[in-house]
Image (cartoon, rainbow, N blue to C red):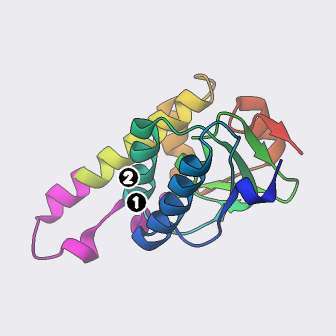
Amino acid sequence: MSIRRSLFWTKPVTADSMHGVLKDLMELIKEDGTVEISLYISSSDGSFDQAMTFCSFVQVAGFNFNTYATGSLDSSSLPIFLLGKQRFGFPQTSIILNDDATIFDRRSALSGYASDKNLKEEGGLKRKCFAALVTEATGGQWTEDEILLKMKKQTLILLEEAAQVGLVTEII
């Protein structure tokens, strides 16, 4: 693996960090779309909206790469990690399934524009979307309800457990 074909996402998942990684990813694809790309991720803060925007773009564009969890992942960065055709975890990796309002809710950003009821419903839909992604990654070993409960409890997932259920394909 060439370090030249590697990208690093070490900042919170925001519009700026997403655009930076997308720009670099597109440059590597343009340079040679046949050579493997690795995305190293250690991000434990950010926006589920931005993570899903990144995921949608990557899926529509058909980009393939491997992902490496090098530090902390949470509910904002886990969807990006799950994009990897192979998903590697380093021994120091921690994954937390959290239900932080700053990840799923846009209340502060949209206050005055939408009712609290609509924003609460939107947050609930995002949580269900996240749970569905994780359920799919585990091959159904964890149900959506189990994941939502783990999120509510702010559950730390140990790397060995993440590998057993399929979130991580290999511990390196």
Residues drawn in magenta: 98-121
Q: Nearer the viewer, residue 26 or 111?
A: 26
**Mark 2: amino acid:** Thr
Q: Nearer the viewer, residue 6 or 164?
A: 6
Q: Residue at x 52, y 44 (%)?
A: 149
Tell me if label 2 and label 1 are in contact, CB under 8 Å. Answer: yes
Q: Residues within 10 Å of mark 2 (few under 14, many from 20)?
A: some
In terms of secondary structure, where does tag 2 sit? helix
Query: Mark 2 = which residue?
Result: 53
Q: Would residue 42 be found to the left or right of residue 147 on screen?
A: right
Q: Residue at x 42, y 39 (%)?
A: 61
Query: Mark 1 = which residue?
Result: 50
In terms of secondary structure, where does tag 1 sit? helix
Q: Would residue 164 be found to the left or right of residue 53 on screen?
A: right
| Residue 102, picture quadrant | bottom left
Residue 75 visible in the picture: no
Q: Nearer the viewer, residue 13 or 110?
A: 13
Q: Is residue 101 magenta?
A: yes
Residue 86, image x and y in percent? 71, 35
Q: Nearer the viewer, residue 165 or 146?
A: 165
Residue 9, image x and y in percent? 62, 64
Q: Residue at x 10, y 76 (%)?
A: 112
Q: Is residue 19 magenta?
A: no
Relative vertical location of residue 170 with respect to residue 71 in this rendering, above or below? above
Q: Where does the C terminus fall, quadrant-wise?
A: top right
**Mark 1: amino acid:** Gln
Residue 97, image x and y in percent? 59, 52
Relative vertical location of residue 42 with respect to residue 16 in this rendering, above or below? above
